[in-house]
Amino acid sequence: MTVSSAVDTKNKPSIWKVFINNLINLPWTWRITILYLTFMLFMPILAMFLKASTEPPAKFWEIATNELALATYKVTFVTSLFAAAVNGVFGTLIAWVLVRYDFPLKRIIDATVDLPFALPTSVAGLTLATVYSDNGWIGSLLAPLGIRVSFTHLGVGVAMIFISLPFVVRTVQPVLQEMEQEIEEAAWSLGASQWQTFTKVILPPLLPTILTGVALGFSRAVGEYGSTVIIASNTPFQDLIAPVLIFQRLEQYDYSGATVIGVVLLSISLVLLIAINFLQAWARRYDNR
């Protein structure tokens, strides 16, 4: 190495120094955003991963993949996907009715859609467990058919559908309001049926928005605890979900075990959300064509 290159290397600022200088020169909006996300999102997630990393890899794998944990992952994610898919269909239908039709008490029904946002989840679970019990208003109608909802796996699905419905409706509704009905009328004038108009004209630009609402609803359902813990029997290998298992581990002072399951839950959710985002990008690319 020559003397000049050695001097240049010595005078070259470090990566951290360049990063800090760039950070200081950022607009104040960027600095506030980064600071807020660091303290409210990144640091808690990092702390959880660091806590889980205190376990040896073999112990970590044993906790994360024991039979009970695997059963709770299956119940949690399969039921959440089911609830998100159901709301993807019916939430879109509700948004369509609220946007395209005028009817009595429309404002009250529109406001009621947001009720799961404001209602404490424990109250929601208690209400659902009562209504869907064998003696409840809805459960008494299903009981003669041999269908039990409260304190079963099906009850977990009902609770997840209830708490995640507003995400789809409120995501799709503004997009529907901005869509021009003249496009639909043009399709009808060219001889397209209502079904063809919906599938060929309305659905393609609406699909990315529906997927966004489904992703938000899925994320909410995965992390739901308050309502599901009441309406489910919390029986292992039947309707026990991962958030309840984490709480049970905490009650047993097994903080490392609870953290490991939380990390697995977070990792799987993150992978699924990234996959849904790629699907949204593909849908937008298809729409642009």
Image (spheres, rainbow, N blue to C red):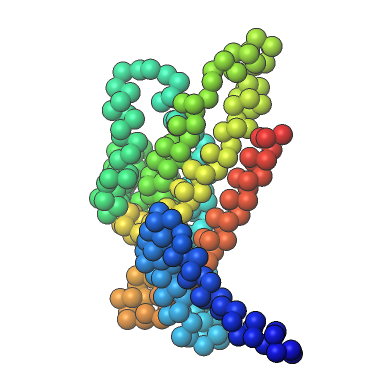
Q: Residue at x 65, y 9 (%)?
A: 189
Which residue of the protein is positioned furthest toward the top in this rendering? 189
Is 87 rendered above or below residue 111? below
Query: Of 31 and 261, which appears nearest the observer?
Result: 31
Residue 286, visible in the rendered structure: yes
Is 105 rendered above or below residue 40? above
Residue 130, visible in the rendered structure: no
Query: In the rendering, at what x and y percent does residue 219 appear?
Result: 46, 54
Query: Of 184 and 220, which appears nearest the observer?
Result: 184
Query: Of 18 and 261, which appears nearest the observer?
Result: 18
Q: Residue at x 45, y 73 (%)?
A: 46
Residue 211 placement: quadrant: top right
Query: In the rendering, at what x and y percent does residue 214 appear?
Result: 51, 45
Q: Residue at x 60, y 79 (%)?
A: 12
Query: Of 180 and 234, which appears nearest the observer?
Result: 180
Q: Residue at x 39, y 63 (%)?
A: 35
Query: In the rendering, at what x and y percent does residue 177 appear?
Result: 46, 26
